[in-house]
Image (cartoon, grey):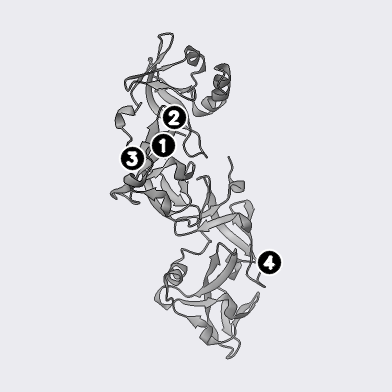
Amino acid sequence: MTANQIRGLPVVTVGGGEDIAEVRDVIYSPEAGALIGVTLNQRGFLAGRRKEVLAAVSIHAIGEHAVMVTDEGALVLPAEAPEEVSGADSSRNVLGNDVLTDGGVSLGTVADLAVVAGTSGEVVGYQIIKPDGGSGYIPLPAQLAVSGVALVVPALTEDFVRDDLVGLGAAVDEFRQRLGIA
Amino acid sequence: MSDTFKAAIGRKVVSSASAEELGKIARLVVDVDTKKVTALVLGKGRKARIVAWEALSGFGPDAIMVNHESGLREATDEMDHRAVDGALELIGKRALTELGNEIGTIDDVEFDPVDGTLEVLLVGKQKHPATTLLGNGSYAAVLDRSTDPA
């Protein structure tokens, strides 16, 4: 699934069956290759922002219809959250960044994150807008260098551009094996 | 022999002391930890009355027998109000797996009328053992990962 699909999902307690908040935005660390948390809104149409954040370590699972947490204690004020969550800096946002291979080829710009459903937010690829305007997905190595304007991926990535998330899912393992990091 | 929530809703509740009908079952209240029916709600809104499972002398196919009319009480604490408002019932509840995927709506529940133990949750055409139930609240009933399609 993509970060766009995660925004707006209810945050639901496993033990309580209550919807206690909803996802305002995701906090992503390109270095970690994972979501490190999410910011929150109150539940309900036009409801306001919540001060609390939800760190990835407190997420039970992210699914198609809800972000599951054990209980309401998972929502904490930023001051009480792990530093990488509270100190998250939007300049590390990769959306709109140019994706360059280390061979010097531009694969497009980052449009969204591809998140593994059922995890606490592992990011295995990016949705990109290709130079021809079409949409595609690229797998990511586990870790990545990012400047805030561009990111550099192995040249091999060019062979693994896929049209949809299903294709990406199949490509990730082989891609990482070929890179020798799986 | 199992009974089901859908079949039980609307069934009359009768006092064995006076033989009078006290009302009809509107909701069955379940406890997620024990996986049992813990109480019945008779009527709705302000007229709703709660009868604890322990106050029943029999849960039969034609009537539910209560020892005495005094077994019925009004909603007092927060749990009672949640029970009366339907937050603690299962029928019609969104069924969400612990992985965050919706698998349908809980259409019916099979249970043992002898001790109130929940047996099977019916979600559309799927049947899941009641032991998969992890949580139940106003938003959803949460089932464990064995029920997840992914």
Element at badge 3?
helix
* Residue B88 location (% of width, % of height): 49, 64
* Marks 2 & 3, CB-CB < 8 Å contact: no
Which of discs 3 and 1 lies nearer the camera? The answer is: 3
Residue matched to label 1: A36
* Marks 1 & 4, CB-CB < 8 Å contact: no
Residue in front for this viewpoint, A84 or B42: A84
Q: Label 2, label 3: how many angstroms apart (C-alpha)?
A: 16 Å
Q: Amino acid at mark 3?
A: Ser
Residue matched to label 2: A32
Going by the picture, which residue comes out furthest to the bottom?
A: B18
Subunit of mark 4? B
Element at badge 1?
strand
Which of discs 4 and 2 lies nearer the camera? The answer is: 2
Q: Are marks 1 and 2 on the same chain?
A: yes
Subunit of mark 3? A
